[in-house]
Image (cartoon, grey):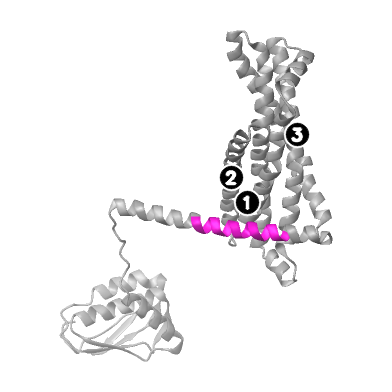
Amino acid sequence: MSRSDTHFGTSWLSVDGPLWSLLGDWRVGNAVKIDRFLGKISRSLPPQSIRFDLSRLSELDTAGAMILWQLYDRLTGEGHDVDIINVPDNMMALLSAVGVVRDKPMPQPQRLNPFYARLLMLGKATIGVVEDTTAFLSFLGLITLTLWRSTVQPWRLRFTSTVHHMEEVGLKALPIVGLLAFLIGVVISYQGAQQLQQFGADLFVVNLLGISILREIGVLMTAIIMAGRSGSAFTAQLGTMQVNQEIDALKTLGLHPAELLVLPRVIALTLTLPLLTLYANIMALLGGALMCWLQLDISFGPFLRQLQEAIGLWTLWVGLIKAPVFAFVIAVVGCYQGFRVSGSAESVGQLTTRSVVHAIFLVILLDAVFSVLFAWLEI
């Protein structure tokens, strides 16, 4: 195959001097065989005008087009004048597209100094946090305006939907909240008794239990439970509606998604979390009282008398005042993440996890702010 008047033929290529006719099926199933055959063509052909004739080609896909262009580039690099002729109309677009793509250089990974790489990651994370915070504040403003409009125009409130969500986030949460609160009371009493017994101050376990449960642990534990239970449920529900395009359908019908979907959930959780906190406080004190009776032989009567002396009215109200604020934040975060779902089941899972993490973070942050505020007010 070293003369310019070369003649040979196969199932895929027929060569008649400068006319190279492509034959048969140039698709991915034959790609390896075609590529192996073309690699055997002598590279000692004298420079000449070669024409690839595609009129007899029956099938062509991306793999076949890429092999043809590789042969074209190889022959051109060896000094031949190569042209492609008689391209069928149904193959023209594919051949052109592959030709354009193969001309583009492959992107090379940018190698950065390790310090600059970490700095770049920090910058991207900071921008992401700023953008996410801005979007959340915008959503918070929307919910606040919607709540104000519904307060001025009470007939806009979805009473049935609100009661339904109160049952879901309140009544059905009683077993898990009560059990965990009872166990927390048992643990605090047991651990406190282990330490105070060393100093003969057994009775002050009641003071420790009452103040810690009513001021901090009761409301904080209940809020965290509701963030994991109800906040995640809000995100999953709204995210699934977003994936199924149900929210788009509501907008098409002229209904306000925030008013129809978000407000009932926010109101329901804001109303029920203080009641759940009170219930959790009672269950935790009962658990502590049981442990005091079993371990310290402090009966229920002395326990109540010491508890009444140890705590004041503000001790109870400090915890209950926090509950509506925590509930509002948990509900808004859960609904906000639900509206951010981008249309896949994976996105629902990711944003549900993010909803719980962000809600718990904000609850603990707000609890710290309340602690500083109450200390400043000497409450």
Dot 2 alpha-carbon crowd within 10 angstroms: few under 14, some 14 to 19, many 20 or more: some
Tell us which disc is closer to us: 1 or 3.
3
The residue beneath circle 3 is 278
- Residue 372 is left or right of residue 209, and the answer is left
Dot 1 alpha-carbon crowd within 10 angstroms: few under 14, some 14 to 19, many 20 or more: many
- Whether pointer 2 and pointer 1 mark residues with C-beta atoms closer than 8 Å, the reply is yes
Q: Is residue 118 above or below residue 12?
A: above
Q: Is residue 339 visible?
A: no
- Residue 231 is left or right of residue 119, and the answer is right
Q: Quadrant of the N terminus?
A: bottom left
Q: Amino acid at mark 3?
A: Leu
Choose top left, top right, bottom left or bottom right for residue 309.
top right
Mark with earlier residue (2, 1): 1
Q: Is residue 12 above or below residue 210?
A: below
Give me the residue at 67% from left, 65% from top: 245
Q: Nearer the viewer, residue 44 or 114?
A: 114
Per the rendered image, the range of residues in magenta is 130-146
The residue beneath circle 2 is 362
